[in-house]
Image (cartoon, rainbow, N blue to C red):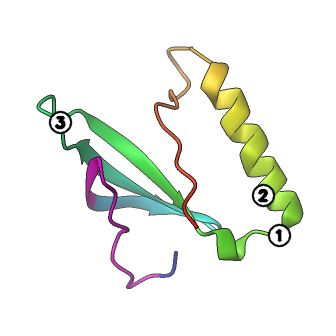
Amino acid sequence: MAAGFAPPKLKDFILTEKLGSGTYATVYKAFRKTDSREAVAVKVVSKKSLNKSSMENLLTEIEILKTVRHPHIVQLKDFQLNN
């Protein structure tokens, strides 16, 4: 996501500040819209910037993070693929 673009609109989250960005993704601080207002990090990946190999690597990362539960590794709580 290029600098200067507003964070995407997500149905279940309110995105606030940008925490960081890299070549393929930008990470935002966000809150669930539910009563809990749980604070989370939302990683937004621009599909346009991914080649086939990068997309395969991303999908592998998602599959691994779905199963990992460790106190020193972030927990994947949700995943959305938008067209």
The answer to which image quadrant residue 31 occupies is top left
Q: Earlier in the sequence, mark 3 or mark 2?
A: 3
Please state if 51 lies on the left or on the right of 41 as rendered: right
Q: Residue at x 15, y 28 (%)?
A: 36
Judge whether 77 appears above or below 57 on screen.
above
Secondary element at image label 1: loop
Q: CA distance from mark 1 to mark 3?
A: 35 Å
Looking at the rendered structure, the number of numbered marks drawn on it comes to 3
Q: Does the residue at mark 2 contact the one at mark 1 (Cβ under 8 Å)?
A: yes
Observer-side mark, 1 or 3, equals 3
Which residue position holds label 2?
55
Q: Position of residue 17 (x, y in %)?
A: 27, 61
Observer-side mark, 3 or 2, equals 3
Amino acid type of the residue tagged 3 in the rendering? Thr
- Looking at the picture, tell me which residue is in the foreground, 73 or 76: 76
Q: Main secondary structure of the magenta part?
A: loop
Q: Which residues are magenta?
A: 3-16
Q: Position of residue 5 (x, y in %)?
A: 39, 82
Judge whether 9 appears above or below 28 on screen.
below
